[in-house]
Image (cartoon, coloured by chain):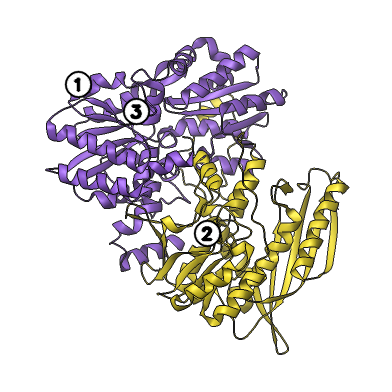
Chain colours: A purple, B yellow
Amino acid sequence: MMKFLSEYRDPELATALVSRIRALSTRPWTLMEVCGGQTHTIVKQGILDVLGDSVEMIHGPGCPVCVTPLEQIDRALHLAGRPEVIFTSFGDMLRVPGSDCDLFQVRAQGGEVQVVYSPLDALELARANPDREVVFFAVGFETTAPANAMAVWQARELGIKNFSVLVSHVTVPPAMTAILESSDNRVQGFLAAGHVCTVMGWSEYEPIADRYQVPIVVTGFEPVDILEGIWMAVKQLEEGRAQVENQYARSVRRDGNRQARDIVSQVFELVDRQWRGIGEIPMSGLGLRDEFAAWDAEQKFDLHGIRATEPAECRAGDVLRGRIKPIECAAFGKACTPENPLGAPMVSSEGACAAYWSYARYREGGGGGEESAEQSTEVRS
Amino acid sequence: MSGPKGPNRPDAESLASVGLSCPVPTGEGDRILLGHGSGGKLSAALIRDRFLPRFSNPALAVLGDGAEVVLGTERMAISTDTFVVSPLEFPGGDIGLLAVHGTLNDVAMMGAEPVCLSTGFVLEEGLSLTLLDRVLESMADAARQAGVPIVTGDTKVVERGKADGMFINTTGVGRLRDDFRPAPDQASPGDVVLVSGPIGRHGIAVMAVREGLGFDVDVESDTAHLGPLVESLRAACGQHVRALRDPTRGGVASALNEIAAASGVAISLDGGAIPVPVPVAAACEVLGLDPLYVANEGVLVAVVAAEAADSAIQSLRAHPAGAESIQIGEVKDRPAGMVTLRTGLGGSRVVDMLPGDQLPRIC
């Protein structure tokens, strides 16, 4: 596996691509990488440093941890605190702040919260604990939807009644459309998320590229992938084209993964969905179909009464829409740090704010001079 | 640490209207979280805010791997550690081996020559005596190989469910030397940073067993006594050795952050030079972890004067546990207190202390 990875991390190949991008751009272009995994690579590998002024990258809303609405987090916290419930989740949801606390704190209070690596592990846990209610926090984009759908499907097939899912699935194309529709949009081209397209394919992006005249390049997650994706998008922009192209050909086919799409559409249907920091986007989420209502935690535990409003000082919405860089938020590094996050983008390692915090902070603070030293004192105080 | 602030909790009326009473705690930050044991910022804050003010004294204030105390004319090192690993046995070792190596290593990182160990056990009702025997054999072997006797101890038994099989505490006493005093605050610009072997093996070996990852991870814990490596370093480089740490929980990143902060210097790492075994790198990829934060039990990081770098590396490589010793970075003056890493592409990033445990990513 690492052999395949190292090929896409080859510094020489990457450096050559950077030169090609710089040579190709006749003006500074503004691109958005949709997926948080891509943001992570861009910042972790110092890609912003090497691109210079040729391309500005705006970090998109594709971090599932970041866009899961506060209300769903509060519902998760409520469920996790119930004595009969074993609450299961992917690891990085545990530190996402709800209105009052996070899942770690609920666990310290006696709630049973377990990290799982797959929803099928949660289903197995339900089978092994017939006297408990096992709830899985089904968050994510189209990437995690097939496995989550499979868990619900299997629960029905096997007649496992003490398993349910708290669903907060979202889909990429409506979010891209919402960004393009906004009056202050600056995005001129997209790197679409390779993993999402591995499941869904790219045909659904063709109408978007056509209607809004933006290049969309389906892109992978390694440094060479991302630089090649940027190069392909810049090339389209320079040539005045607006098409969907596939950089991530080793994983993505035009129609995606048929079996995965089938299980998703059998279990889920399109619903309106709240995005944290952004608001409701019509038909932008996946909800369980009626026939699976018995496995829907919201119905099973009647959670509709739990409502929440987001803290006003958190500008996650502006960050997720690319209106401001994390460092331009007044709360960044002061009221909002990874230890005390105001909003989810500061929590997940894929979140734009946390990525800036971990990897790029001292550059922005003056290129490593005195200012950054002061900043670091602040961090440690 | 206070928890996340939230002025907008789910309002009580809306909850009451559907017959729910929200069990979400409202007294934020009033309990110990698992993250307080991670070796990251939460651990540091716990010690700084609650332990230090109450136990305050000059020896403690140094906050090294152990303390220095003077007995008559002799300067002694004393260090204590408690071991709570689950599972108790894992590829490459067990809790007993860790308990001896871990404390001896802390004594070694102070530059001291170990004299003796004490140990305390908390045993859970129902623990297999065969398993206990194996752990005790491991401890005895490790102590014998190190030439350090376990001179006193204590056992307690608690009811089933009150402890995870067994917890072990060990305390080590060592003799400090006047001509060899590495300390976290002694790094200065121009020094180089060395690591004595491939990183991340212990953490990944334990995680692979504990988490039931469902794929084979061909890696064993690196647990080892580092005293002989330190002794070679001392013989070869003496006072050129500025700082030594064994990067256990929190990994190499946290250990180097502590040195950078204590010395008021910057540490700049060469991302391509850091030795990460292929199985560790692969497991970290799958789990979304960074090997720089994964625990080691048989690796040391050393900050040494640049002119001593070659002889330091040669002296470490004379030992099996140090055969792959290599330089991974250098000490600079700015940005003070921070660790940065140069990427293969020529960019750079901050390698920060983590707030708590590393969390596996969703996708």
Q: Which residue is mark 3?
A: A249
Position above or below: A241 against B118? above
Task: Tell whether B224 sits left or right of A63.
Answer: right
Callout 3 amino acid: Ala
Disc marking residue A210:
1
* Image location of residue A165, percent across then percent down: 55, 23
Query: What distance separates the C-alpha of mark 2 from that of mark 1?
Result: 49 Å
Q: Mark 1 vs mark 3: which is more N-terminal? A: 1
As drawn, the residue found furthest toward the top would be A291
Secondary structure state at the residue bearing disc 1: helix
Q: Position of residue B307 (x, y in %)?
A: 45, 78
Q: Compare residues A318 and B327 and report the one nearer the observer.
A: B327
Which secondary structure, mark 3?
Answer: loop
Callout in the foreground (1, 3): 3
> Is A348 drawn above or below residue A181 in the view shown?
below
Q: Answer with left or right where residue B185 lies relative to residue A176.
A: right
- Name the residue type under label 2: Val
**Res B242 seen here:** yes
Residue density around tag 3, few if under 14, some if 14–19, many if 20 or more, within 10 Å? some
Q: Circle 2 sits in a helix, a strand or a loop, which is it?
A: helix
Foreground pick, A354 / A331: A354
Chain to which the residue tagged by mark 3 belongs: A
Q: Residue at x 32, y 39 (%)?
A: A226
Report the Cα–Cα distance between label 2 and label 3.
36 Å
Q: Nearer the viewer, mark 2 or mark 3?
A: 3
Callouts 2 and 1 on one subunit = no
Residue A332 position, x and y percent, is 36, 51
Would you name the residue on which mark 2 appears? B252
Marks 2 & 3 on one chain? no
Callout 1 crowding tier (Cα within 10 Å): few <14, some 14–19, many ≥20: some
Q: Chain of mark 1?
A: A
